[in-house]
């Protein structure tokens, strides 16, 4: 587990070359000067020991006002929950190796324009809200009905990306839309 929280002077995180291929959690939050997230060249999987709940993201980046890059996760293939909250300087989130994801939360990111993932399985809960500049939401070829979809306050979101998500809901889906 790596938790970096409340460090007002930290501007960059290092490359963790000796980190194992599997870890429990990476949580980076409330770092006022942080511009660059970490690099994990060997990390393939993040996992949580308990059933996912609202505050249990394996990869969480929250309230780092200057963060311009989340870091590098070139081999990350699997995690249950990804949370990206209140990152006003971040313009894109790209995880091209991510194949398995259960829950995606992207909230209140003022400058975020792109989210690009390659998810093939899972993805039953999607919360994307309060991202006024978000234009591209490309999540990969995962299919199947969603358990929950929150899609609100993303006025710039491309119509086709929105429609792809709407095509994955039915009367059993808990949906909050604008």
Image (spheres, helix red, strand yellow):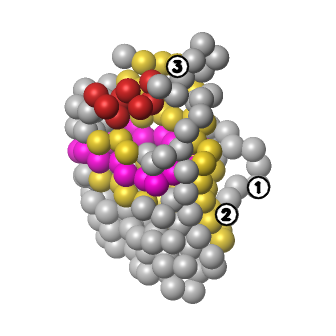
Task: Report the magenta residues as a range.
Answer: 101-119
| Residue 174 against residue 24 in the figure, above or below | above
165 is within the stretch colored magenta: no
Q: Which numbered disc covers residue 24?
A: 2
Residue 170: x %, y % from top left: 57, 18
Which residue is disc 3 drawn over? 175
In the image, taking residue 132 as reference, residue 101 lies left or right, namely right
Residue shown at 51% from the left, 85% from the top: 17
In the image, taking residue 112 as reference, residue 19 lies left or right, namely right
Quarter of the picture holding the C terminus:
top left
Residue 141: x %, y % from top left: 48, 46
Which residue is disc 1 drawn over? 49
Marks 3 and 2 sit apart, C-alpha to C-alpha, by 30 Å
Residue shown at 57% from the left, 42% from the top: 123
Residue 101: x %, y % from top left: 58, 50
In the image, taking residue 25 as reference, residue 177 lies left or right, namely left
| Residue 124 against residue 29 in the figure, above or below | above
Marks 1 and 3 sit apart, C-alpha to C-alpha, by 28 Å
Q: Secondary structure at mark 1?
A: loop
Disc 1 crowd rating (10 Å Cα; few below 14, some 14-19, many 20+) is few
Residue shown at 53% from the left, 44% from the top: 142
Marks 2 and 1 sit apart, C-alpha to C-alpha, by 8 Å
């Amino acid at each position: 587990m790596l938790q970096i929280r409340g460090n007002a002077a930290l501007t960059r995180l290092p490359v963790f070359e000796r980190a194992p291929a599997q870890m429990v959690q990476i949580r980076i939050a409330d770092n006022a000067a942080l511009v660059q997230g970490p690099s994990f060249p060997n990390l393939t999987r993040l996992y949580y020991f308990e059933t996912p709940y609202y505050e249990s993201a394996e990869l969480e980046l929250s309230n780092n006002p200057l963060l311009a890059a989340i870091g590098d996760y070139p081999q990350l293939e699997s995690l249950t929950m990804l949370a990206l909250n209140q990152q006003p300087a971040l313009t894109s989130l790209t995880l091209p190796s991510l194949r398995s994801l259960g829950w995606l939360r992207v909230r209140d990111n003022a400058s975020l324009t792109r989210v690009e993932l390659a998810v093939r399985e899972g993805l039953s809960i999607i919360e994307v809200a309060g991202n006024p500049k978000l234009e591209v939401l490309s999540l990969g070829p995962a299919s199947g009905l969603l358990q929950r979809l929150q899609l609100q306050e993303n006025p710039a979101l491309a119509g086709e990306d929105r429609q792809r998500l709407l095509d994955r809901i039915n009367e059993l889906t808990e949906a909050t839309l604008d």
